[in-house]
Amino acid sequence: MEHVAIADQVEELHNPSSFISKYVWSQDHKVIAIQYGITAILVGLVALVLSGLMRLQLGFPESFDFIDPSSYLQFVTMHGMIMVIYLLTALLLGGFGNYLIPLMIGARDMVFPYLNMLSYWTYLLAVIVLLASFFVPGGPTGAGWTLYPPQAILDGTPGYDMGIVLMLLSLAIFIVAFTMGGLNYVTTILQARTKGMTLMRMPLSIWGIFVATILGLLAFPALLVSAIMMLFDKLLSTSFFMPAIVSMGEQLDYTGGSPILFQHLFWFFGHPEVYIVALPAFGMVSDVLAVHARKNIFGYRMMVWAIVAIGAMSFVVWAHHMYVSGMHPAFGFFFATTTLIIAVPTAIKVYNWVLTLWRGNIHLTTPMLFAIGFIFTFTHGGLTGLFLGNVVIDLPLSDTYFVVAHFHMVMGVSPILVLFAALYHWYPLITGKMFNATLGKLHFWCTFLGTYAIYLPMHYLGFLGVPRRYYAMGTTDFIPESAQTLNASITVAAILVGLAQLIFIANVIWSIFKGEKSGPNPWHATSLEWQAEQIPPAHGNWGEKLPEVHRWAYDFSVPGARDDYIPQNMSNDDVPLEPGQTLQIREEH
Amino acid sequence: MTTETNKPTVDTRWQSLNSDWANDKETFPMPWGKLMMWIFLLSDTFIFSIFLTGYMNVRMSATEPWPNTSEVFALTIAGQHIPLILIAIMTFVLITSSGTMALAVNYAYQGDRKKTFLLMIATALLGASFVGMQAFEWSKLIHEGVRPWGNPMGATQFGSAFFMITGFHGIHVSAGVIYLSIIANRVRKGHYEGKGYHIVEITGLYWHFVDLVWVFIFAFFYLW
């Protein structure tokens, strides 16, 4: 008997009819994606406000009564944790992963829609538990997003009582939610691709999401285990991470634990987490660049292998976050070497993005502006990474604003720019409407120039030796007066960038109701999601028959073809030709 | 591969491997749920590996001596002092349950619902008795004064790691018992007629994994 792929087997689609089953307890991957997206953006706005409060304190110390040292540390911690986990990870994988995977590979939905629905509601629970920590006695934890013990659970750290417990609990719940979603993403990509959609024909967005999800499934266990162990240290007085310690003049019951163990476990998760955020962004920006430059992505195979190589390497570089922890110098040598090696596939990707633009027919649309902006910010953030990856240069720069500037450039601003590029690019697909381009471009220039105004000066602050996470500098001999002026200007820029995001929100909401109808495929893209019968795609995505794929996702400007793009589901015989021309297509790419 | 060459060259072998994996539709010829279970187990492997690595690390960092496990887990039965006897029985029971599970999978694919049901229930019962013996072991240690936060026999991390790791494994076994019972009951009712019995194998994958993890816990925690 011939083996029939499960995706091709005839099965009745459940057709939700009531409002609740359509939009609330929905099992449709598109609705779940939007639920993920809205939740992540809302909680991200909380984190944005927190960063604004931090900047107010740093720029104008002693001007705001409601920010004291404790609340400052709490703002720092919650800002970091929310942005990395609850906004970026959730929006890139839960949001875009959910929306794009089935559409781009030609599936009707995720392989297990019910599990997918559970994933969102568990994520929402994690968010609620996290936000609840703002309202408990003592407030949220102020241990820094790295939550290093012993100080994270000891008296003297804000939120050491309830805040840290809720934080760890929320992380554990988030990991459960991510695992349910992640299993779905990986299985869907491996098993539910439509006819003709080989792995090497998948758009790079899918490759990025795929490898990032695998990283998540293998890296989050480290965070889960360390969260459990720290919860035990806090609630059951075990001594996994707690050495014998005197706190507030009192000998505590802890003995013989290892705080360095937590650092290793945390960064075994924490470093892959950087790539969990970066790889989907790499993938999506590749697709946006190719579509809006009307040119195939340069070096598709190399792009795929670079994603895979970066993903694999990301598990053997974690201790470069720990050069100052006092670990053996030979470890430092090993981790510096692996860290610099990981720059090679990353550089390949940057070159290929630039070469994709080279002699392309560049359309400076809003998503394209954000994508090009990403190449700038990512290159800058990547280059400062070379400084910090070397032990001897990292030691003096560690825990200064240079580090803050570096990681905000490389994994804050860069993925956010890609998220905006992706949101603008796929906005017509998701809503069926066109956003306002003028507002979009205004939003881009405010955000792009504004982030440079924030983070470039931070590098100088770091060279001056200004330490991160300090509530106020006070009078410090080695820091010149001018550092304060710089801090004030950064704060002004940060507030402006924060306000500029209102343009985006206004644009999104206004365009849903008043925007022009986008029509199908407004960007003339080749990939499958734009070839659905309806825009936005209906429940089940495709009509009677699944699409059949005949080519890769990057057949732009093929010589001989009438249009400058050939959709993936169009066979060579169907391509409309220029009069008197033949299609000049290379079989292997 | 061309017909002229009998032996595939390295190159064509790689190419056919590549084309198998990069195939459209399905990378692995198995149902969705089975692949998902494999990937979940891979993720779960990382959880247990990190638990065990963390335990080994605190065992090294502990300042007080580590108790002698073969003495701690010894029982006196009929006047005989036998080290690790309970753990040996527990291990035997769990390994046996893997055998009954494998038989259940075999009968499931043959379509013998009754035997499949009985063997799955036998597996679940063996699993439940494992959990019962674990409860006995816990109460014995608690009775002797071992707590997560302290331990009269030496390093406090001994108690912490013991309760954490065996507890986490015990939760896995208990979840497996419930999972097995639900699936076994559905098999009995004929819920999977016409759908195929892959689900029995998927349940089995989980169960064998829980067994395998126990072997590592046995080696690294009890024997070391």
Image (cartoon, rainbow, N blue to C red):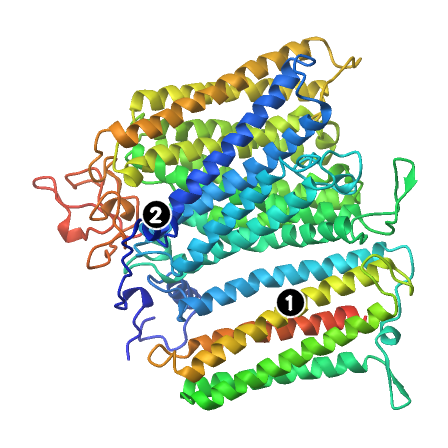
Q: Quadrant of residue B155?
A: bottom right
For mark 1, what is the residue? B171
Q: Amino acid at mark 2?
A: Tyr
> In this rendering, does residue A101 appear at all?
yes
Res B204 seen here: no
Q: Nearer the viewer, residue A467 or A162?
A: A162
Judging depth in this view, the residue of B54 and A95 nearest the camera is A95
Pinpoint residue A575: horizontal percent, then vertical percent: 15, 47
Percent across and percent down for residue A215 are 54, 51
Across and down, in percent, residue B44 comes to: 59, 62
Q: Is residue A586 above or below residue A545?
A: above
In the displayed structure image, the side of residue A553 where residue A62 appears, left or right = right
In this rendering, the answer to whether A173 lies above or below A86 is below
User: Viewer-proximal residue, B21 or B79?
Assistant: B79
Give coordinates of residue A576: x percent, y percent: 12, 44
Q: Are marks 1 and 2 in contact (CB under 8 Å)?
A: no
Question: Mark 1 or mark 2, which is nearer to you?
Answer: 2
Residue B208 horizontal side relative to residue A585, left or right: right
**What chain letter is assigned to the residue under label 1?**
B
Q: Residue furthest left?
A: A579
Residue appearing at x 74%, y 46% in the figure: A331
Q: What element does badge 2 sit on?
A: helix
Q: CA distance from mark 1 to mark 2?
A: 35 Å
Name which residue lies at 81% across and 48% down: A242
Query: What residue is at 60 percent from the left and 46 percent from the top?
Result: A170
Q: Check disc 2 and report the residue beneath it.
A: A23
Could you say whether the residue bearing mark 1 is in a helix, strand or loop? helix
Report the number of discs.
2
Q: Quadrant of the N terminus of chain A?
A: bottom left
B20 up-or-down from B89: above or below = above
